[in-house]
Image (spheres, helix red, strand yellow):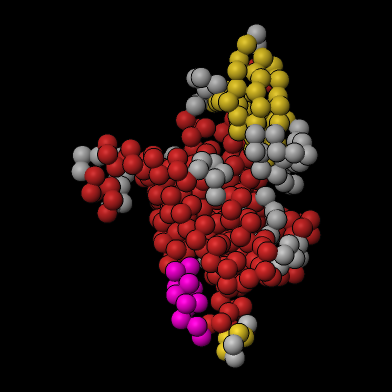
Amino acid sequence: MNELAQLVDDLCGRSTGDELWRNLEDTGLTRLTSNQGAGPAEAAIVLSGLARHAAAVPIAETDLLAAWLAGKAGLSVPDTGPLTVAIADAGERGGRITGTARDVPWPSIAVVLAARTADALLVGLIDGTSHGSIDFDLAVTELRRVDAVVADELVRRGAWARCNQIVGALDAACDLTVAYTRERVQFGRTLSKFQAVQHSLAAMAGEIERARAATALAVAAATDYGFDHPATDYAVTVAKVAVGRAVDPVTTIAHQLHGAIGVTIEHRLWRSTMQARSWVDEFGSTASYARRLGRITLAADDPWDVVVSYPAPR
């Protein structure tokens, strides 16, 4: 695992953009789980590592989502090049499927459509677009019908990926903030010597570690049971809540301690915090997962067991 993390760091250290994608593809990291036989633990290392470097590459969309979904539907997708998914509620009438997929991540590349109807999930390949929404009007015969539960797993996979990526982005924000406060001198001493700054840094670290612990549980659940298991569903729900609640305090403290320099587009902090904020409500908002966690807890025979224990497989 350490070697994989080091590989990601090395690739990000020497390349960006299209060159980074090519290097990731050459090493098999763009399709690590779909083509290389790796599992969630390896995928988590890659996703968090790339996010730590603010790398703008659609690894989660290509590997964990689009390639996986295409495989479930029996569709062939290219073995090279980036992919993404478009998830939408759709209507079926007169042999046609219509709808609009909104907030499509990385919309300008090849797209695997996941169109949800009342009783099934319809999957097909469509062209990308230059903006975040895609309108579609397709014949039913152009799509593959799969079980509706696949849609739930698709969203769960996306939420799981975003948790890992956000933790990586928050780690970067914390590292940058600690380094800045050790270097920046104010009133004759570095910022890190002020007690108020130390308290803020401790609060930031605490939020990140809480998010990391919840995300580690989700990684363990996906590794042990797979993404389609109730234990993973529970663990991802917990992680989404913990990670979502960490984003605002961590990014706020980071920018407060950096001052004006942290909001310039050229500064690495801006890239890390903006990524975290843009990811936090994708594949379900923090509030929606908090409500879901509450329903899971209240439905249990003993709610306390849900709070303090890892759900047994069933």
What predominant SS class does the magenta segment belong to? Answer: helix
Tell me where the magenta segment starts and ends, as one range: 193-205
Q: Quadrant of the C terminus?
A: top left
Going 50% across and 83% down the picture, which residue do you hit? Answer: 194
Q: Nearer the viewer, residue 88 or 58?
A: 88
Q: Nearer the viewer, residue 206 or 27?
A: 206
Q: Going by the picture, which residue comes out furthest to the left?
A: 302
Q: Going by the picture, which residue comes out furthest to the front?
A: 187
- Magenta span contains residue 196: yes
Question: Would residue 211 be seen by someone viewing this image from the given angle?
Answer: yes
- Magenta span contains residue 188: no
- Residue 144 to residue 162: above or below: above
- Residue 36 to residue 301: above or below: below
Relative image position of residue 214 (x, y in whole percent) = 41, 56
Relative image position of residue 265 (x, y in whole percent) = 73, 62
Residue 199 found in image quarter: bottom left
Going 60% across and 18% down the picture, which residue do you hit? Answer: 91
Q: Going by the picture, which residue comes out furthest to the bottom?
A: 188
Residue 65 found in image quarter: top right
Going 65% across and 34% down the picture, which residue do you hit? Answer: 102
Q: Going by the picture, which residue comes out furthest to the top?
A: 94
Residue 6 found in image quarter: bottom right
Going 48% across and 34% down the picture, which residue do you hit? Answer: 152
Question: Would residue 157 be seen by someone viewing this image from the given angle?
Answer: no
Number of numbered discs present? 0
- Residue 314 to residue 96: above or below: below
- Residue 102 to residue 172: above or below: above
Left or right, 210 with reference to 192: left
Q: Nearer the viewer, residue 187 or 38?
A: 187
Relative image position of residue 257 (x, y in whole percent) = 58, 72
Q: Nearer the viewer, residue 202 or 296?
A: 202
Relative image position of residue 277 (x, y in whole percent) = 59, 53
